[in-house]
Amino acid sequence: MSDQSRRPHKSHKPHRRPQKDPVRILAFEALRAVDERDAYANLVLPPLLRKAREKGDFDGRDAALATELVYGTLRRQGTYDAIVAACVDRPLREVDPPVLDVLGLGAHQLLGTRIPPHAAVSATVELARVVLGDGRAKFVNAVLRKVAQHDLDGWLEKVAPPYEDDPEDHLAVVHSHPRWVVSALWDSLGGGRAGIEDLLEADNERPEVTLVARPGRSTTGELLREEAAVEGRWSPYAVRLTEGGEPGAVEAVREGRAGVQDEGSQLVALALAHAPVEGRDALWLDGCAGPGGKAALLGALAAERGAVLLASEKQPHRAGLVARALDGNPGPYQVIAADGTRPPWRPGSFDRVLVDVPCTGLGALRRRPEARWRRRPEDLDGFAPLQRDLLRTALESVRVGGVVGYATCSPHLAETRAVVADVLKQFPDTELVDARPLLPDVPALGEGPDIQLWPHLHGTDAMYLALIRRTG
């Protein structure tokens, strides 16, 4: 008998090829695009879903699951990172980002959905085998089995510091927001635990799609004939799509007669349009018009009064989006590409001016959850000079007796009241207009004269608006 024949026989399991799950692979690809390219999920996901449908890989339920996996993982990233950190033997910064994305997807399935734990683990490990390889799939399997030992509440008791010891850090971990954002939002709300918890939780809820019926081109009655459509809460032009309604399936949206526009954005335009002006009311300006939602609504409202809207946007490609949104407006309008801080128009030209200034976007974290992890406190210093310059130019552009609306999709005090207060020191011949009576059906607008909308109170983005009249 040869030596070889005396060796014990090893039984090898046949190598199994990993099973490709189109839903989870697509979710992983979207998360990688967000991380690697600083992309936004709301821009990355639709073309991926469209391509999957065209290939025949997806039906409606698959698309809904992929969307939930992407947005749920991004919204709860801070919480899941804290939990995963408790289950690995190294700092998270030493774990490869693609592995963290897979672990985040697995953690969300285990802790944030109704997917059975064994199915969540096995499906995620299978995904890891496809996109990471067998070696790292074993690591994913080991970590997720630890994650599966507790539910979300059980984990939060372990990884979140007690509220009494560190309120901001407790809220940051439990509600998955960076600590500095928690602090800033709390300051804007004016204190109180209940309010900040309600706001942070609202940031983690999937927002409904809200449509705007552009006056003279569509009506809410037309939009309400759509399946799963209900009236808006506050704007007379708003219609909400419930149960995951698809705006691209709405004929008026495809034709540009209606658009997708948060109700808070609609209210800002309506308040400016309703503000009393002294004398003529013939020429309106949207000084930061891209991508065109407010401009389209303002243009339609201006047309009803025989007024003309000039929509100005610095970036030419965004000016193109504005032109598309205004195409078909019932009255005259003009779209130009111009720098709002060095405008081509003469001072005192306009009766109404809106500047919805670039900002950190902390008021739209429901729609862009990745922004909370991307933004840094120092970003405020970057936006501050531009915000002040745009408001100064807007005040110079409006005539005496006219009104300027300063708006921003951030409730951060450094981007709202601080900007207005600083600029008005340079313009003594101005006065703040109480904006609250202009939206009489909307409750809880704050102490005035400016208004602050909130996701948890109004179901809108956290839009801010100050109205300022030139008096001399």
Image (cartoon, rainbow, N blue to C red):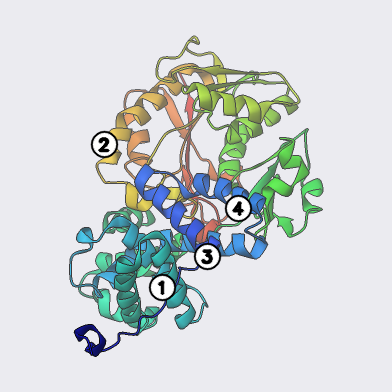
Q: Amino acid at mark 4?
A: Ala
Counting residues from the N terminus, which is met first, the one under dot 1 or under dot 2? Answer: 1
Say the numbered circle drawn on residue 422.
Answer: none
Q: What whole-number distance in Å separates the C-alpha atoms at marks 1 and 3?
A: 18 Å
**Mark 1 sits on what residue?**
15
Q: Residues within 10 Å of mark 4 (few under 14, many from 20)?
A: some
Distance between the alpha carbons at the discs numbered 1 and 4 = 29 Å
Q: Residue at x 66, y 49 (%)?
A: 54
Task: Report if residue 171 is visible in the image.
Answer: no
Residue hosting label 2: 381
| Left or right, residue 232 beside residue 197 | right
Residue 66 rendering spot, x and y as whole percentages: 54, 61
Looking at the image, is mark 4 or mark 3 earlier in the sequence? 3
Tell which residue pokes out farthest to the front in this image.
1
Q: Amino acid at mark 3?
A: Asp
Q: Secondary structure at mark 1?
A: loop
The quarter holding residue 319 reads top right
Pick whichever, 90 or 301, lies toward us.
90
Name the residue located 56 percent from the left edge and 56 percent from the top edge.
443
| Residue 455 percent coordinates (x, y) | 50, 57
Q: CA distance from mark 2 to mark 3?
A: 44 Å
The residue under the point 50% across, 81% down is: 116
> Quick one: label 2 or label 3, which is nearer the N terminus?
3
Q: Secondary structure at mark 2?
A: helix
Q: Give how far across and how far down residue 372 sits, in percent.
A: 36, 52
Which residue corresponds to mark 4? 52
State the residue position of label 3: 21
Under circle 4, the secondary element is helix
Q: Quadrant of the N terminus?
A: bottom left
Residue 395 occupies quadrant: top left
